[in-house]
Image (tube, rainbow, N blue to C red):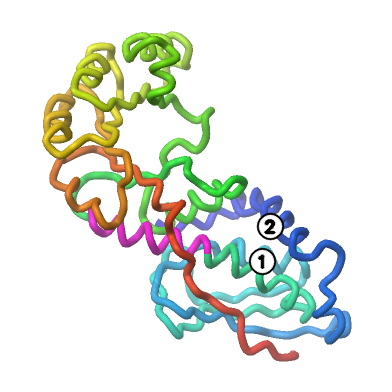
């Protein structure tokens, strides 16, 4: 999947402007001291690591917010694999805009591409299994939309976007409600009928109770190997299944053969390293 939704990109202006204000409180003293206003230039976007690119619309938008006449010409799209040394495109704009926006643009692009790259390596391990790879809400505050977009660019899928987006009853919800059945019954009575009810279970006893109460999806959280295998068989045909809890690139292979519907991993967004990229060879037009 190669998401390039222009309307979604416009929703990111707030994120980009906040980052620019953080980096340029009132002026870029370095750029303004060496380049006269109005002088235009061109620079190249270069890849310094193999990976998957994501965040190109954010990269481009950063410069257009600083210079409405900025032109960004790219040879790749979000979701494409890229290799070390590859030229990904060029940016032409006022030199002050190029210098001032460089770090903010690369910070977004490197972070989002790192998530897409890590996600692709995990998604590849699930290829052909029929199991969907999901992200979580373990995202950088304020940047969830961008990070979940990057997951999709890397071949993963989004779990619920926020607390208003779906019903997921976890251990503390169960404790607050007074038990698995009560939590499900409360959610069923309160939530719109179109909402699926997902509940987290940690034991086979909780799973049985959840299935009997009519849960649509059961999240099998931090279960051991034998218990997990029994849980998947028990839920088959009665509810969709999701495995969660410390799932990473290093250990996901052991879950592939179980035949679950979903595997969710917070590591996709909270543990992905950045992809190293640079803006080089700035020259006047």
45 vs 232, left or right, is right
Whether pointer 1 and pointer 2 mark residues with C-beta atoms closer than 8 Å, the reply is yes
Relative vertical location of residue 103 with respect to residue 116 in this rendering, above or below = below
Hey, which quadrant is residue 179 in on the image? top left
Q: Residue at x 68, y 57 (%)?
A: 16
Q: Position of residue 89 (x, y in %)?
A: 56, 79
Region of the chain picked out in magenta, as a range = 111-126
Relative vertical location of residue 282 with respect to residue 237 in this rendering, above or below = below
Q: Secondary structure at mark 1?
A: helix
Q: CA distance from mark 1 to mark 2?
A: 8 Å
User: Relative to the observer, which residue lies in front, 104 or 176?
Assistant: 176
- Quadrant assignment for the N terminus: bottom left
Q: Residue at x 53, y 67 (%)?
A: 110
Q: Secondary structure at mark 2?
A: helix
Give the residue pinned by disc 2. Answer: 16
246 vs 158, left or right, is left
209 vs 3, left or right, is left
User: Relative to the observer, which residue lies in front, 91 or 28?
Assistant: 28
217 vs 78, left or right, is left
Q: How many marks?
A: 2
């Amino acid at each position: 999947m190669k998401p390039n939704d222009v309307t979604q990109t416009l929703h990111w202006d707030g994120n980009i402007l906040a980052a620019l204000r953080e980096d340029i409180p009132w002026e870029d003293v370095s750029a303004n001291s060496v380049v006269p206003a109005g002088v235009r230039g061109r620079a190249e976007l270069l890849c310094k690591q193999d990976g998957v690119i994501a965040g190109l619309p954010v990269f481009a938008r950063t410069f257009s917010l600083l210079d409405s006449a900025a032109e960004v010409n790219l040879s790749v799209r979000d979701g494409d694999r890229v290799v070390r040394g590859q030229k990904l495109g060029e940016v032409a704009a006022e030199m002050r805009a190029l210098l001032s926006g460089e770090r903010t643009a690369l910070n977004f692009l490197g972070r989002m591409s790192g998530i897409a790259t890590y996600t692709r390596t995990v998604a590849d391990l699930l290829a052909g299994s029929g199991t969907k790879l999901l992200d979580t809400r373990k995202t950088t505050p304020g940047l969830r939309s961008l990070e979940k977009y990057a997951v999709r660019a890397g071949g993963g899928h989004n779990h619920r976007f926020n607390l208003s987006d779906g019903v997921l009853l976890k251990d503390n919800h169960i404790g607050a409600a007074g038990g698995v059945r009560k939590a499900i019954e409360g959610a069923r009575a309160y939530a719109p009928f179109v909402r699926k009810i997902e509940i987290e279970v940690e034991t086979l006893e909780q799973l049985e109770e959840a299935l009997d109460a009519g849960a649509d999806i059961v999240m099998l959280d931090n279960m051991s190997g034998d218990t997990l295998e029994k849980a998947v068989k028990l839920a088959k045909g009665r509810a969709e299944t999701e495995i969660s809890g410390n799932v990473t690139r290093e250990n996901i292979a052991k879950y592939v053969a179980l035949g679950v519907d979903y595997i969710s991993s917070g590591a996709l967004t909270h543990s992905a390293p950045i992809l190293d990229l640079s803006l080089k060879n700035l020259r006047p037009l």
